[in-house]
Image (cartoon, helix red, strand yellow):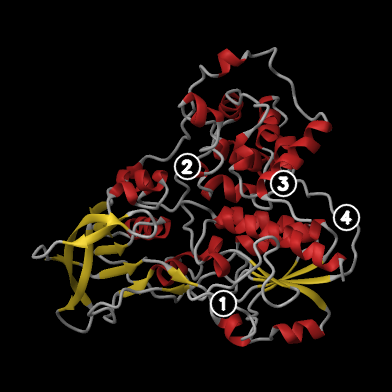
Amino acid sequence: MFLSMSEFNQEYLKKERDQQWRVDLRESLKQKDRVKIERLKMPEQDPRVRIKNNLEVNSGLTAEQAVTEAQRCLDCVNPTCIEGCPVNINIPKFIKYIEARDFLKAAQTLKETNALPAVCGRVCPQEVQCELTCFYTQKLKKSPVAIGNLERFAADYERETKQISVPEIKKQNNIKVAVIGSGPAGLAAAGDLAKSGYSVTVFEALHEIGGVLKYGIPEFRLPNSIVDMEIDILRKMGVFFIRDFVVGKTSDINDLQKQGYKAFFIGSGAGLPRFMNIPGENLIGILSANEYLTRVNLMGATKPGYDTPVHPGKNVAVIGGGNTAMDSVRTAKRLGAERAMIIYRRSLEEMPARKEEIHHAMEEGIEFNILQNPVEYLSQKDGRVSRMRIQKMELGEPDESGRRKPVPIVGSEYLIDTDLVIVSVGVSPNPLIPKQMPQLKVTRWGTLEVYPETLETSITGIFAGGDIVRGGATVILAMGDGRKAAAGIDQYLKNL
């Protein structure tokens, strides 16, 4: 029998309470004193300095800051914060260990359910998940406990003190499971399957392990060294990684089945960029955010000794308002753009990027052109984009997403100079595996159809999650899929 997310959380918490893990610190600090503590702001680089380097913007909490922030946690009887976490971290438990200064135990607690705590502490949108459901937010109307900052602190402390722990692994059962794609969904699935004793191999098409964590997120938000450290823990858990292996080209699932793989998880992501199909979109200097960020983040376009080309751009326009758009425009600024701008067809309030990323972009001098949309790209010579025609928009009635639909304002068009345009208006699922296996059912958007309880596809023994199912998701939602699919795979294999 499969539990709903709410039922899973309740069962998980009951089990944890029965084990009497709680660090009871209420006598040292009363509840009324806890609520008086103001949320601590994460230290960060000065904007004038950070736009000239690629180092992390946020520098992390000190031990004293982490303990103080942890003291704000009220250790609720019914911790609603866990309900907001897609990977079911026992949030009060790890925070109370930080308050008790047992930082290593806090990190170990995170790893019970999260394969990538140092990553999630940096890029997970806690403000719309666990922190949104925090008691402070819901009942006291105050700033929530900084759960993400504390998660990052615990994971970083373990790494910086060179006391990295490896989660407990059950006895090997020698059953082979293949994970296709080494992004967050695949890594989460691999971690849970390895804990359950399976022999797990992750097949990655690119030359680096990490998927979107490596090619899609800049180092100033998520250093590659952090991703590599988390992956190394998975290796110590027994997960085997094969790079430069395209399932569907190098070999297919039928071939892997002949090699003894009994179940599969497809986490191949959504790497197919979308464009707007407007005049001039094929001009030189117009590229997708995926291509731009991959060249810079994964292919060494800005590093000495690499031949990967990237045009830095003087007047750079990024089309879109999501996190990928923010990553692109802030990268362009660091590459020397004199004018780096966001072109977004809705209002600032409707922009889907994290509020922190929007705030950091504004601090860094990024220009925001909201309620505007490109309708044509123009070239003066050599087939390279030199200007774009922009149309102003206004908000009309809500569309199917519930947001007010942008409507063009007649006669409002004007021109902007630009020599580099980065299009970040969404992505589509990778079509390679569905094309190779026509019996896989897909939606009209090209995503794989799965059973919601187990994430099994229309083919028995093949499961899927992340962007290949959702069409576009956050790192933590993809990881939640990976964990859910791993549970489904475990149940499937036990019933063979």
Residue at left offset 86%, top offset 70%? 175
Q: Nearer the viewer, residue 15 or 191?
A: 15
Q: Is residue 18 above or below residue 189?
A: above
Residue 218 x/y as whole percent: 46, 58
Amino acid carrying label 4: it is Lys
Q: Is residue 440 left or right of residue 329?
A: right
> Pointer 1: what residue?
442
Amino acid carrying label 1: it is Val
Residue at left offset 76%, top offset 82%? 256
Amino acid carrying label 2: it is Asn
Residue 431 x/y as whole percent: 54, 80
> Pointer 3: what residue?
8
> Pointer 4: what residue?
170
Mark 1 to mark 4 CA distance (whole Å): 35 Å
Q: Is residue 112 left or right of residue 365?
A: right
In this view, which residue lies farthest toward the left?
411
Q: Is residue 294 above or below residue 366?
A: below
Q: Quadrant of the N terminus?
A: bottom right
Among the two numbered marks 2 and 3 on one chain, the one whose residue lies closer to the N terminus: 3
Residue at left offset 65%, top offset 43%? 155
Residue at left offset 14%, top offset 61%? 409
Mark 2 to mark 4 CA distance (whole Å): 37 Å
Disc ID at residue 58: 2
> Residue 276 appears in which quarter of the rendering?
bottom left
Q: Is residue 226 left or right of residue 412?
A: right
Mark 2 to mark 3 CA distance (whole Å): 33 Å
